[in-house]
Amino acid sequence: MSLTPKSSKRGRFAKVSPQVIHLGGEHTVTGSCHLLQISSLNILVDCGLAQGTDAVCPMEKWPVQPRELDYVFLTHAHIDHIGRLPELVSNEFHGEIIATHPTKALLGPMLRDAMGFSEKTDDQAARLSQVIDEQSWGFEYDRRFDLKNGVRFTLGPAGHILGSCFIRFVSDDPPWSVVFSGDLGAKNTPILPDPSIPEPCDLLILESTYGDRLHEERKDRVRRLGKVLTSAMSDGGKVFIPAFALGRIQELIYEIDRLLSDRDFQQQFPALNSQSAIRNPKSGLPVFVDSPLGLEITEIYSSLAKYWDKEANDLLYHGDHPIDFDHLYAVKNYHDHLKLLELPGPYIVLAGSGMCSGGRIVEHLKAGLEDPANDVCFVAYQAPGTPGRDIIRYGKRPGGYVCLNGERVTIKAKIHVLPGYSAHADQNGLIEWVESMPEKPKAIKLVHGEPQAQSALGSILKEKGYHMLMN
């Protein structure tokens, strides 16, 4: 997609008008990868893995090869935005990787974990991690930086996860600007500052994950979570929460802590806050983080308090660490994980992966889905073709089942979907963000969304007078 005819050349290109070519994540929600060609520069924005049935373009079919790329910009550290970096480096990418400082800090742990599920040896993974670390640079928010050939960029807070950003590129010759929204978060998200508003642009590349739906208000979602947890205590069941190690686990820890310490919630959910429960986890509701990566990321989050929002920092200042509390337990090794599988409820487990496609949550679900006393809470988007999507789809049907690691498991546990916990802005949030820009973009291209979400959001924006690029 471009605003002007594309150059017919492959590889290095003559000075032509800027263009954006989508290599992944154009009409899907994973595998984000976009090529910006501007002022004789080849710039990649994100380089993510696809999940479920989503697809990305093989690198050998790219209009430029990895060795011809000058820069890779990362909007944040989720694997569907960074997961192909090892492949990129293996294919002779020698340019610079640019991100915010928190994303730079999170990059290594996320990629090492992802490569642990690949066919790479430990030595290969370690070498690739080192090379990526050497090629990557962290930058501050809201400052304008120069690249070369008259191109400048600014990174703005996107409110999706810690370190997430939107990117604004500006060129002098020709005079042109483009904003890549990255993944935009909702306002009032725990720990994170709200998304800021970019300066005007000629082209806006806008995510549309929840372009066709609305989320709950934050207090409503916490109340719903509180009701589920109270129910779990009453029937002695376990609560399984498939959660992404980066962002979602920290957010859930934060809000479970609010349920246990905020006076308003204490009055609404006394069963969660009895003194006996706090003194004796066996009679209360202990919370287990069964994710080595999630634990590592939580430590990194704790070290980056300067990037937290005011509410989280105020709690920390007054002695209430926002992502730590009494009877929060770390499951650090596989032996403890196996013991947890045998532990009777009630308790809560936060474990990856967020879409149930791997990780320790799979073993919890295999052991617990057939027990009607248990609950499963989905707090993230579930891509088509993932076990999480199947559990939601078939979980309320008589005889519904899901295949986990090739094993058919009947779904008898109660299934809950808490859309308010999405890390993405909903339809209203996306529209509000666009309308807050000081001038209308000359054109908007929707990406990172399923067709129905893009259609719904695109129709509303078009009705509001925005020029939409469709393809």
Image: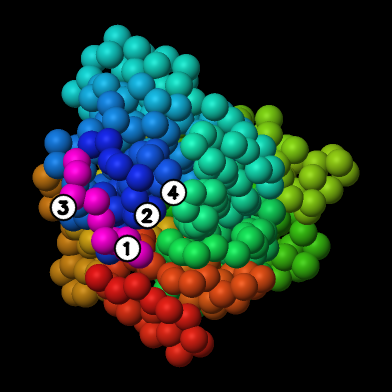
Q: CA distance from mark 2 to mark 1?
A: 7 Å
Q: Are marks 3 and 4 in contact (CB under 8 Å)?
A: no
Find disc 4 in the rendering and name its residue. Answer: 243
The residue that appears at 33% across and 33% down in the rendered structure is 69
Q: Residues within 10 Å of mark 3 (few under 14, many from 20)?
A: some
Position of residue 154 in the picture relative to residue 467 (left or right): right
Asked if residue 210 is positioned above or below residue 152 in the image, the reply reads below
Q: Closer to us: mark 4 or mark 2?
A: 2
Asked if residue 48 is positioned above or below residue 333 in the image, the reply reads below
Position of residue 176 in the picture relative to residue 313 (left or right): left
Position of residue 199 in the picture relative to residue 167 (left or right): right
Residue toward you, 173 or 207? 173
Find disc 3 in the rendering and name its residue. Answer: 403
Find disc 1 in the rendering and name its residue. Answer: 4
Find disc 2 in the rendering and name its residue. Answer: 17
Q: Earlier in the sequence, mark 3 or mark 4?
A: 4
Q: Residues within 10 Å of mark 2 (few under 14, many from 20)?
A: some
Q: CA distance from mark 2 to mark 3?
A: 49 Å
The residue that appears at 39% across and 31% down in the rendered structure is 70
Position of residue 168 in the picture relative to residue 209 (left or right): right
Q: Earlier in the sequence, mark 1 or mark 3?
A: 1
Residue range of the region highlighted in magenta in the rendering: 1-10
The residue that appears at 34% across and 18% down in the rendered structure is 128
Secondary structure mostly seen in the magenta stretch: loop
Q: Earlier in the sequence, mark 4 or mark 1?
A: 1
The residue that appears at 47% across and 17% down in the rendered structure is 134
